[in-house]
Image: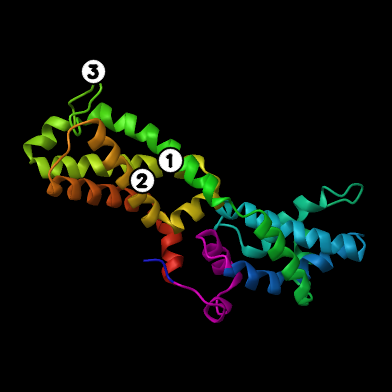
């Protein structure tokens, strides 16, 4: 189970761990990182010849970039090295300022004693992040479309509620049927929602996936119930025990498809 973090416990982590926690979905980690390192980025931008206002803009853009690309954090890189590369990426946008990225420049970046920026700079960043927050209604619409696709695929492998494709395969259904009708419908429900969430995980932007994952229990059960009623209406209604098995399989399918990778789940539990 993912650990619930607060500002105090996050403040005890080093920058490397903060970025890992942030990449795993804990947004509060960005606030700690901002207060620690925004001043370093600001001072480095000033040293490259930018004005104060332009340097503050660089800080905002660097952390927006971190927010947008949280999934891409490479744990093999040191935190300051990664922040330095993100800073150089933004500096390149401000020609003719040269955004050097040599070893000497990295050493200069690391030696800066970061001073905390005024709190209003964090509030500006938080407002910008809020403006970019995924639209949950759109996420629901998109995952519903993916669920329709997964339903069509699932009916190719499983005959359910008397419904099937004319040329469906029995490669999975026959072995499962030998284990019993309860196992068969549990497996069918599992495939329905697992496919929907796997497609979402592959296709959605990372922020949209995190938003969906946060509400996965309600989304999974909502999609499962709608599917159950629709399939029952189009096909043959089933006994309550089979319906419950199908729903249980659907929920577990969504849960399994939402499991974090080992590297992220480790830091989410706290190392």
The colour scheme used here is rainbow
Secondary structure state at the residue bearing disc 3: loop
- Is 126 positioned to the left or the right of 186 in the image? right
The image position of residue 212, as x and y in percent, is 47, 52
Secondary structure state at the residue bearing disc 2: helix
Pick out the residue farthest to the front. 233
Q: Which residue is mark 1?
A: 144
The reply to whether callout 3 and callout 1 are in contact (CB within 8 Å) is no
Q: Which residue is mark 2?
A: 223
Asked if residue 115 is positioned above or below residue 38 in the image, the reply reads: below
Picture disc at residue 56: none
Q: Residue at x 82, y 60 (%)?
A: 57
Q: Assess whether residue 249 is covered by the magenta stretch.
A: no
Image: magenta residue range: 4-27
Of residues 60 and 263, the one nearer the viewer is 60
- Is 127 positioned to the left or the right of 30 in the image? right
Tell me if I can see residue 65 in this picture. yes
Q: Which residue is mark 3?
A: 166
The reply to whether callout 2 and callout 1 are in contact (CB within 8 Å) is yes
């Amino acid at each position: 189970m993912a650990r619930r973090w607060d500002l105090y416990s996050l403040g005890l982590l080093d920058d490397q761990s903060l970025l890992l926690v942030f990449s795993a979905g804990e947004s509060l980690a960005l606030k700690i990182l901002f207060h620690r390192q925004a001043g370093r980025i600001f001072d480095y931008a000033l040293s490259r010849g930018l004005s104060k206002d332009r340097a503050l803009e660089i800080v905002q853009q660097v952390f927006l970039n971190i927010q947008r690309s949280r999934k891409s954090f490479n744990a093999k890189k040191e935190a300051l090295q990664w922040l330095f590369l993100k800073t150089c990426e933004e500096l390149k946008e401000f020609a003719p300022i040269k955004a050097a990225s040599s070893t000497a420049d990295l050493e200069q970046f690391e030696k800066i004693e970061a001073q905390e920026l005024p709190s209003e700079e964090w509030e500006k960043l938080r407002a910008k992040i809020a403006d970019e927050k995924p639209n949950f209604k759109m996420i629901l619409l998109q995952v519903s479309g993916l669920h329709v696709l997964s339903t069509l695929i699932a009916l190719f492998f499983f005959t359910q509620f008397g419904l099937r494709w004319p040329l469906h395969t029995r490669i999975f259904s026959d072995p499962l049927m030998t284990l019993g009708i309860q196992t068969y419908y549990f497996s069918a429900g599992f495939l329905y929602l697992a496919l929907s969430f796997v497609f979402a995980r592959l296709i959605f932007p990372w922020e949209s996936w995190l938003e969906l994952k946060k509400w996965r229990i309600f989304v999974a059960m909502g999609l499962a119930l709608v599917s159950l009623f629709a399939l029952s209406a189009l096909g043959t209604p089933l006994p309550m025990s089979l319906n419950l098995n199908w729903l249980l399989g659907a929920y577990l399918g969504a849960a399994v498809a939402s499991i974090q990778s080992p590297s992220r789940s480790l830091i989410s539990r706290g190392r």
